[in-house]
Image: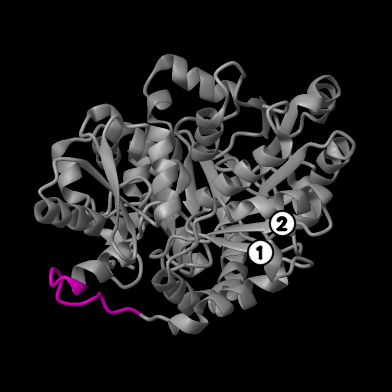
Amino acid sequence: MPVSPALPAGLPLGGLPGGTPHSVVCCLPRMRDVVGYEERHAETMAAVTVGYPRFVAHRYLAMVAAALKAREKWDWHVCLVAGQTEADTLWDFVKPRSGLIQDEGDFTVVCLENTRENAGLAKSWLQHTGMAASSRQAEAWLVSHGLLPAAHPEERAPVECAEAVVRETLRPFLDPASDREIFLARAGANAFYAAYQAVSAVQGPKRPLWIQLGWLYLDTTCLLQKMARPDVPPILRLDVNDLAGLADLLKREGHRVAGIVLEAPTNPLLETADLAAVQQLTRDCGTFVIADPSTVSVASVNLLPFCDLLVSSLTKYTAFHGDVMAGLLVVNPESSLGTAARRHIAKHLTAPHPLDLARLAAQIPRFPAMVKQVAETTARLVEFLSTHPAVAKVWWSGQERTGNSYRQVARSPQSHGGLFSFAFNKPLAEVHDRLDFVKGPSFGTEFSIVSPFLYLAHYDLVTTVEGRKYLKDNGLEPDLLRVSVGLEPAGVLIERFRQALA
């Protein structure tokens, strides 16, 4: 992989050198590119031809929408979703005054009255629920209608056995769940959406409260907020180590709490709660625990015994080429709450498209070895940076504050995962722009990625005095860099950090 300064802004990364049309990572090599992306500068956005599919409308989907509008002479706002169920869900959320739903064979088209409000609501819903048609679905439609000459060449497993390959590879990390408790989703966000809806169905309207432990991924928090009743605070955030606060809250409000959501470890601070203690606190109050190991993958931690439902992104680590969107939802078969939720999951889950599963199946058999190698490299990088005079702090799975809790769920003492964050005593742009790494969103790829995470996830906060104070009050350094470690030799990566921090 070429070093980051040699890569132009907007270049798709993943799959093959130079990227593929299905890449989920786009290059933002300089801080001015990050600002241009967040502020939607014309020059930057013209260069961004692909991006993380839930955030950036894929050009193949835009091509299909344009072709349908021309064919049907529509003046609607057009959304392409996975199927009829997803179309009905989107329609119920937007509640347009006019429009239509039309089956297009492999996907469903939702046409909404062409207003800014409808477009904004639809975009938000598709982003947080992961229900959109996939780029490979759109590509197949464009090829079949003569609008593309052929599908992009890529390694795929045979479609008929792809799901079995994915399940067979994941199953050793999901014991004692059987196939009936393992659900594959179109995205990690869709897995969480289905889990949320299943829990809500079991708990009913008398349990409207949710608790999140630690600073969670933005879309998880957004979904909890968007689904909340208007008269109820959507979420209550507690520090991952605040077990006394959690015990007190559950004692007072446990009968009204639907569930607790946690990441183990969190993103980007890599903090882990004491899951055994959390499980003990919720045992008698009927509160679900939903746990997410996406930051390090199911190959690094064993969370299922400590939760009722496990959700994870498979876009990271398992699809390490960076060109497939997929997710995972697992029911703990030894949990009565999880068993009660299982019958509701299929109604809200969007399965991966067969072509995406075929591409995932071509990669996933190699992911356990990839996870092991990046964990070894991560430990060496953390050791180097922790003693560097320009580095103020390093956050990683083994950090002093929550390392003991992480080790309780780690599959081995070496299962560190491939993600860490660090802060430094130099200007952000200086270090970021000098680092010879790929820069952009996402993680868990075979190539290392550096990300000014909070600028990409919380730009509204890092750009105001009040917002930066809020982040710091929650333990987040606004100018931290998150590092996703790839398969490059550790010595090469250490030298790149040394040069950038000099």
Q: Residues within 10 Å of mark 1 (few under 14, many from 20)?
A: some
Residue 388 visible somewhere in the drawing = no
Q: What segment is highlighted magenta in the picture?
A: 144-154
Residue 466 percent location from the top left of the image = 45, 14
Q: Verify CB contact (< 8 Å) between mark 2 and mark 1.
A: yes
Q: Residue at x 55, y 45 (%)?
A: 193
| Amino acid on which the number 1 mark rests in the picture | Ile
Asked whether, in this view, residue 486 is left or right of residue 441, the answer is: right
Q: Main secondary structure of the magenta part?
A: loop
Q: Residue at x 29, y 29 (%)?
A: 97
Q: Residues within 10 Å of mark 2 (few under 14, many from 20)?
A: many
Question: What is the secondary structure assignment of the residue under circle 2?
Answer: strand
Q: Is residue 349 shown above or below 154? A: above
Query: How far separated are the C-alphas under marks 2 and 1?
Result: 7 Å
State the colouring used for the structure image.
one colour
Asked whether, in this view, residue 19 is left or right of residue 358, the answer is: left
Q: Find residue 136 and report its image quarter.
A: bottom left
Question: What is the secondary structure assignment of the residue under circle 1?
Answer: strand
Work out which quarter of the rendered image holds the N terminus and state it.
bottom left
Which residue is at the front of the view, 25 or 108?
Answer: 108
Residue 472 percent location from the top left of the image = 55, 24
- Residue 362: which numbered mark, if any? none
Q: Is residue 163 shown above or below 226? A: below
Residue 310 percent location from the top left of the image = 68, 53
Q: Find residue 245 and report its image quarter.
A: top right
State the residue position of label 1. Answer: 182
Asked whether, in this view, residue 366 is left or right of residue 410, the answer is: left
State the residue position of label 2. Answer: 331
Does the stretch in magenta take in 453?
A: no
| Amino acid on which the number 2 mark rests in the picture | Val
Q: Is residue 177 shown above or below 231? A: below
